[in-house]
Image (tube, grey):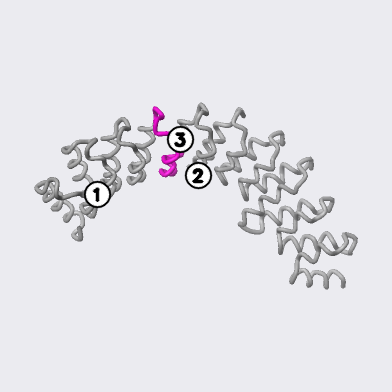
Amino acid sequence: YWTFIAERALRNNPRALLNWPTTVPGYTWLALAAARRDYTLFDRLPKTLSNYAEIFEVVVSGGNEPGRGQMLSHVPNDRADFPKLAKLAVAQNGGALRWVPEGTDGYHELAKIAMRQAGRAIYYVRAGRFDYLELAKLAVHQDGESLYYIDAEYEGYGELARIAVAQRASVLNAIDTSRADFPELAMIAVKKQGHMLLNVPSVTPNYDAICRAAVQEDGRAIQFVHERTVGNDAYYEMAELAVKQNGMALRLIDGTKNPDKYQELAVLAILQNPEA
């Protein structure tokens, strides 16, 4: 009868469990029921409960809140079943890898799971590890912005940057424009999102080709082309590519500099979009 009354009480206030001694009948079952309703009380539960691992599994699998996986921070890492519990946690929230000691059995596999769930978890991986490049690749494949957490001096940075920019073009913003491979990275970025041309200095080697690629992906990128750098003839060639891709790009071109050429562009623009 006590467990019936207690279970009903926990429905209204799961944290009421914290006021009860662990010696009350059915405490382990009540703890499980309470944690199922409020996962945040997990850190207050006795770590000696016979069903501690079962409760943790319920906590982690009970929803999408990132905090569920982070409950791993309250699990003693010297438990025999810690690797198993850690696997549950990093699969739910890759950032939970921060609570997994590098010496944990199966760390490599745990880290791979974490990278696939949240690439930014690469922040918690020691760069000197033998498998760092492998893990970093998984990270930037999952989220290009994971590159922010990788030292630009790392020997594999260039390869990782190519993957990252291909996954998320905006990552180009965080890459040093003086790098020897910046033109290559810029080309990857503008082919994915033409407006990234805004972040490409006009002194960048191969700037002309990068501009052409940008306006072919998004005609509106013509507004970011440095006309003085590419020259008048090349600029209007790019403008033609731009209006063929998006007639509305005509509105971003100054028609007073070369009225005759502008008229030709206008015809092309209207063919692409009558509203141009």
Name which residue lies at 77% across and 44% down: 76
Q: Nearer the viewer, residue 39 or 231?
A: 231
Q: Which residue is mark 1?
A: 245
Q: Which residue is mark 3?
A: 161
Q: Is residue 117 left or right of residue 267?
A: right
Magenta region includes residue 36? no
Residues shaded magenta: 163-181
Name which residue lies at 79% across and 52% down: 52
- 3D distance between C-alphas at marks 3 and 2: 12 Å
How would you rate the neighbour count of disc 2 (Cα within 10 Å): few for under 14, some for 14-19, many for 20 or more?
Answer: many
Q: Nearer the viewer, residue 134 or 203?
A: 203
* Contact, mark 1 vs mark 3 (Cβ under 8 Å): no
Q: Earlier in the sequence, mark 1 or mark 3?
A: 3
Query: x, y percentage for residue 125?
Result: 61, 36
Query: x, y percentage for residue 243?
Result: 21, 49
Q: Earlier in the sequence, mark 3 or mark 2?
A: 2
Dot 2 amino acid type: Asp
Q: Residue furthest right?
A: 23
How would you rate the neighbour count of disc 3 (Cα within 10 Å): few for under 14, some for 14-19, many for 20 or more?
Answer: many
Q: Which residue is mark 2?
A: 143
Give residue 268's mark: none
Query: x, y percentage for residue 20?
Result: 86, 64
Q: Is residue 2 left or right of residue 53?
A: right
Name which residue lies at 53% across and 33% down: 151
Q: Earlier in the sequence, mark 2 or mark 1?
A: 2
Q: Which quadrant, please, contains the N terminus?
A: bottom right
Magenta region includes residue 176? yes
Dot 3 amino acid type: Ala
Name which residue lies at 27% across and 35% down: 209
